[in-house]
Amino acid sequence: MQQQYNTKCAGVKRLMREAMELREPTELYHAQPLEDNLFEWHFTVRGASGSDYEGGIYHGRLLFPVEYPMKPPNMILLTPNGRFELNTKICLSISGHHPETWLPSWSARTCLLAIIGFMPTAGGGALGSLEYPKEERRKLAKLSGNWTCDKCQCQMKNVLLPVSDENSKEAEEAKTLGAQLNAQKPKETSGNVNKQEEKSENLVETVNAESELASENENLNESPPAPSAQIPTPNAPAQIPAPSRISAPRPSDSTDYSLFVIVPLVSIAIAILVILIARRILIM
């Protein structure tokens, strides 16, 4: 499998290391990746003692993202259990539904312990949760040992080690982790659902109102504008017209300026003619 993946990738290195750590089954859990897919694991967990799932052995899938361990895996239960829906990504604070609460320091082992400790808690309407009666859950727990996975061909009663008193430490760790996750669990109550539906309805009404307003504005733009009537302002002072400025008359462009040139020339010509006549007389 190492030849199929880039061993320099942080996620690949992390998953390979965890697979080595979990290669041997314990009394409470066991998990290993598929032979052809490092990012899909099959796991088996034992039901918590003192709960409706005591004596049950449950099988499921862990789907790791490429960004692991920076993002959480998705968890899917395959064995009928009465707590989680089958073949559905369950909603936990440690699952892919809530990456905001995931810690990169958590591992596949943490996910297994979380499932063990979380199963006895109430579903509270979370995604993928079920609320079967106690009798039905106990019945399913007894039948789970004979359940066989179609993918890995594992029969549940042959996967884990027999129960002993040595697993009390891990069982207590699973119980504590389940209680912590239950306290952090985002609750999706019917009230929140109703609020979301009301918000959706209000949004639809707002969009419809905006559409109607836009169509009305288009109609107004197409119709000719009505003449605006000036409404006199009450008690407004009368406006006194400003005095008009008296401008000096400008000469007309049609004035004939040739007289100012012809008259002097004629006078000069007459004077010259008189002088010539006088000289002629004196010579005679």
Image (cartoon, helix red, strand yellow):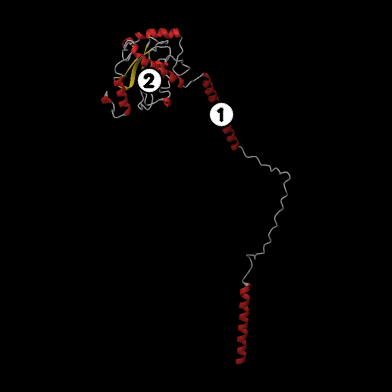
User: Which amino acid, by three-letter code, is at mark 2?
Assistant: Cys
275 vs 43, left or right, is right
Residue 21 - label: none
Q: Quadrant of residue 248?
A: bottom right
The local crowd at label 1, few if under 14, some if 14 to 19, many if 20 or more residues have their Cα within 10 Å, is few
The local crowd at label 2, few if under 14, some if 14 to 19, many if 20 or more residues have their Cα within 10 Å, is many
Q: Residue at x 29, y 21 (%)?
A: 20
Measuring from the top left, give residue 175's x and y in whole percent.
Answer: 41, 16
User: Which amino acid, by three-letter code, is at mark 1?
Assistant: Thr
Pick the front one: 88 or 247? 88
Q: Are marks 2 and 1 in contact (CB under 8 Å)?
A: no
In this view, 210 is above or below 76: below
Residue 205 appears anywhere in the view = yes
Q: CA distance from mark 2 to mark 1?
A: 44 Å
The residue identified by callout 2 is: 111
Q: Residue at x 32, y 24 (%)?
A: 15
Pick the front one: 216 or 124? 124
Measuring from the top left, give residue 276's x and y in whole percent.
Answer: 60, 86
Quadrant location of the C terminus? bottom right
Measuring from the top left, give residue 167's x and y in whole percent.
Answer: 35, 14
The residue identified by callout 1 is: 206
Measuring from the top left, give residue 140's x and y in whole percent.
Answer: 40, 8
